[in-house]
Image: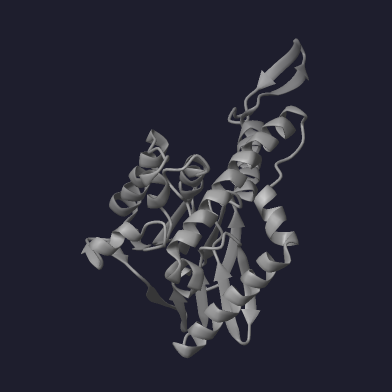
Amino acid sequence: MKNNCKTIVISDVHLGTKGSKSKELVRFLKQYQCENLILNGDIIDGWQLKKSGQWKRKHTRFFTCILKMIEQEDTKVTYLRGNHDDFLDQILPFTMGNLTIKREMVYESCGKKFLIVHGDIFDSITRQFKWIAKLGDVGYTFLLWLNRQYNYRRVKKGLPYFSLSQAVKGKVKQAIKYIDDYEEQLSAMAKYRECDGIICGHIHQPAIKEIDGITYLNSGDWVESLTALVEDFNGEWSLVYYSETQKAEKKQKESKALKSKPIEITGLFGPVEISPKTEIG
């Protein structure tokens, strides 16, 4: 059974890179049925594809999954342009059936308005000094490569996954200040646009918090945190981690297996196996 919800927001999938967890994202989306799916920027990593990135079959499967959601479940899909998929500027705005591609949107639900943007427009470094941003992207790509090597050895030792880049962000003062400034700027923009909240991505830091009377939501990413924002039919938002949905799915499968497992009882002529579906009478 699929989980029904009103809206799902995902961002920063970075298809075309080695770090993209597109396979996990497809598994995640298959567990849900939603009215709206918002792809909030950096879904395709055009920067990496121009250099050393590779488009793989699993990346195509993501879009196959999206098309199935549109055709079979009548899901409305909105793709918002990010800085890594800035090649979309050539076709903006674009609408075809249930698919819309644009730069930003105002989403209204249950009496509240949310400004939804990728977030790079408020990043002065990305906008004004693109070459510096790309240099930073090289550093981040190297950190992800190092992270894969490090975690490969951790898995061999039976240790859990550990994110090097998240640890760096959490300890470097400049990174912490950058994130705080980013969140405050976006919240201020939402207030200026007379919205109740802001939904963004870009910095790969999943969050739901209140900032100066504005609800700030960040969907995180599908490179490390593997998170999505999910809205129920009452307008309540939650941050869903892929690891948690996998645990729930595993429990559900175990429960089904337990229900279908034959029960052994001792009868007059010895042990007898009875299926849970067997009628006794």
Q: Residue 219 is drawn in which quadrant?
A: bottom right
- Residue 118 x %, y %: 45, 67
Relative horizontal placement of residue 232, taking residue 205 as reference (left or right): left
- Residue at 60 percent of width and 29 percent of height: 279
Report the number of discs.
Answer: 0
Where does residue 25 sit, x and y in percent of width and height? 49, 46
Q: Nearer the viewer, residue 94 or 65?
A: 94
Q: Nearer the viewer, residue 261 or 222?
A: 222
Q: Can you say whether 265 is above or below 5 in the image?
A: above
* Residue found farthest to the top: 269
Relative height, residue 162 to residue 211 (above, below): above
Q: Can I make out residue 47 in this image?
A: yes
When the figure is inspected, residue 257 is found, relative to residue 177, above or below; the finding is: above
Q: Quadrant of the C terminus?
A: top right
Residue 24 drawn at (x, y percent):
52, 42
Left or right of 182 in this view: 72: left
In this view, the residue in front, 24 or 118, is 118
Residue located at (68% from left, 59% from top): 169
Apparent side of residue 196 relative to residue 40 in the rendered image (left or right): right
Residue at (60%, 80%) from the top-left corner? 184
Residue 181, image x, y percentages: 61, 76
Nearer to me, 276 or 279: 276
Instruction: Tell me where residue 240 sits by quadrant.
Output: bottom right
Residue at left 65%, top 34%?
Answer: 149
Q: Relative to residue 187, is residue 48 drawn left or right?
A: left
